[in-house]
């Protein structure tokens, strides 16, 4: 039997992850679940939000389902360390970012697919003055380890860095700015990582029948990094004759997002651009309660909802949060390990619950979150899980 490492983390991660496991069980997915310690409690108690024993578990079992974590700025984090660990030089880092780096989880996939009948779906005015609701089915491939978020940056760059930069002719515009009045963030893009993400995007398009892959960059301005990604995309696209390669600029793409989002199939981009487009598209299909993701490396994969730990709702009992982002992350896990039949069953059950519209979380009702949402007709987290499980049972 397969073993899945479960990493509930903090806040609502601890609420939605167990709900996803209930659903996986009900759908007939058989697995051993091993809990991995991760998150704020372990920072406070041990000075490490990602203990080595958790890293070892993931390295051994290869597949993890992750809830969410709480991150705080370093000075705040230090204050919450247990007294015996204070002033011992512990430095907080985000355990999910740590996992991505440690296991080189360089391919981030963020599907943005509308569920029919979701009240949060994007609508636009049509030419006859009415409204239309284009259904969106876009999968964002975001390079997860390089580019502007790789962290190679300086405030007051050291002399060697300044000297190296001065070799570039465009630095003449900055020649009078002292280094201590300057900050530099680099955008490093490599061929191997670009090839991996672009290839993964085309493979996905082929497997799931998407007709186009869009490389969304800005090669007219970022001639080197975006230019290299576009060139690689053109080369790789030759291996996929049935799939068209489109290229868009990130700024224009954000505009087209609200004009013709239904035209886009798979989109691939560098780290920051992928982050931006995936949030943009997620907003068209329901936002954080629906946004799921996968972080995939050569051998290890971690599946997680895009949302964080939502601390303001963690203590509400019963919980008000929407577990669908977590459910869809579990569905991505099933697809990754080849359990397609169960994945399809779960997706179909979720779709039915949403389309029926009888059981809706507060976000789907477009009301403000809080303990009073139930009196306004919102379902709690457990009731949403139960409704999806009920639909599964109707099917079998
Ligand atoms: P958040 O995603 O936790 O919550 C923002 C707001 O979105 C919530 O207050 C709530 O109104 C809504 N929301 C989020 N998930 C929802 C769900 N499942 N159902 C219904 N509504 C939902 O982001 P925030 O408040 O900026 O960060 C809270 C903590 O989470 C911080 O410590 C942050 O560092 C961490 N974080 C962790 C992430 C991760 O684990 N991958 C990602 C983003 C933030
Ligand atoms: Mg983001």
Image: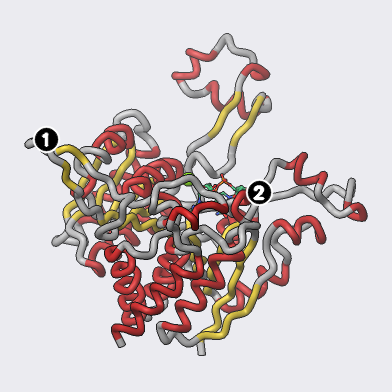
Task: Work out whether 75 lies above or below 337.
Answer: above
- Taking the spot 51% from the left edge, 85% from the top edge, the residue there is 31
Q: Quadrant of residue 201?
A: bottom left
In space, the residues marked 1 and 2 are separated at their CA atoms by 46 Å
Task: Work out whether 300 lies above or below 259.
Answer: below
- Residue 198 drawn at (x, y percent): 33, 55
Report the residue marked by disc 1.
129
Q: Quadrant of residue 212?
A: bottom left
Helix, strand or loop under label 2: loop
- Residue 191 drawn at (x, y percent): 40, 50
**Image position of 70 (left or right of 292):** right
**Between disc 1 and disc 2, whose residue precedes?**
2
Q: Residues within 10 Å of mark 1 (few under 14, many from 20)?
A: few
- Front-lying residue, 352 or 327: 352
Q: Quadrant of residue 396?
A: bottom left
- Front-lying residue, 226 or 295: 295
Q: Cβ(mark 2) to ligand 1 < 8 Å?
A: yes
- Taking the spot 30% from the left edge, 56% from the top edge, the residue there is 118
- Front-lying residue, 2 or 315: 315
- Front-lying residue, 203 or 277: 277
- Taking the spot 61% from the left edge, 20% from the top edge, the residue there is 182
Report the residue marked by disc 2.
71
**Image position of 334 (left or right of 11):** left
Q: Is residue 1 visible?
A: yes
């Amino acid at each position: 039997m397969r073993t899945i490492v479960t990493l509930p983390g903090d806040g609502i991660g601890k609420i939605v992850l167990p709900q996803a496991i209930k659903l996986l069980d009900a759908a007939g997915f058989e697995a051993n679940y091993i809990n991995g310690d991760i998150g704020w409690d372990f920072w406070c108690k041990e000075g490490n939000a990602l203990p080595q024993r958790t890293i070892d578990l993931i390295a051994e079992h290869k597949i993890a389902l992750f809830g969410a974590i709480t991150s705080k700025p370093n000075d705040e984090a230090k204050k919450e360390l247990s007294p015996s660990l204070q002033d011992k030089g512990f430095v907080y880092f985000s355990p999910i970012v740590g996992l991505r780096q440690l296991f080189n989880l360089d391919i981030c996939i963020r599907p943005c697919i509308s569920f029919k009948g979701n009240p949060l779906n994007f609508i636009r005015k049509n030419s006859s003055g009415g409204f239309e609701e284009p259904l969106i089915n876009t999968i964002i491939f975001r390079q997860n380890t390089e580019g502007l978020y790789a962290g190679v940056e300086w405030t007051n760059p050291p002399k060697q860095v300044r000297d190296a930069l001065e070799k570039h002719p465009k630095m003449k515009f900055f020649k009078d700015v002292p280094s201590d009045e300057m900050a530099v963030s680099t955008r490093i893009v490599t061929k191997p990582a670009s090839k991996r993400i672009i290839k993964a995007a085309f493979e996905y398009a082929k497997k799931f029948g998407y007709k186009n892959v869009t490389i969304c960059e800005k090669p007219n301005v970022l001639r080197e990094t975006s230019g290299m990604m576009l060139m690689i995309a053109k080369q790789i696209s030759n291996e996929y004759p049935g799939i068209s390669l489109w290229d868009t600029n990130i700024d224009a793409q954000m505009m087209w997002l609200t004009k013709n989002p239904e035209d886009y199939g798979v989109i691939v981009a560098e780290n920051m651009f992928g982050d931006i487009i995936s949030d943009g598209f997620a907003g068209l299909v329901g936002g954080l309660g629906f946004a799921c993701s996968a972080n995939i490396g050569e051998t290890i994969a971690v599946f997680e909802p895009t949302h964080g730990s939502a601390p303001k709702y963690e203590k509400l009992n019963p919980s008000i949060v929407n577990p669908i982002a977590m459910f869809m992350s579990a569905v991505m896990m099933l697809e990754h390990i080849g359990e397609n039949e169960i994945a399809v069953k779960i997706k179909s059950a979720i779709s039915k619950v949403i389309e029926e519209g009888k059981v809706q979380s507060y976000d789907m009702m477009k009301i403000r979150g809080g303990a009073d949402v139930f009196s306004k007709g919102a379902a709690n987290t457990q009731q949403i899980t139960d409704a999806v499980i009920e639909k599964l049972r109707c099917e079998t």
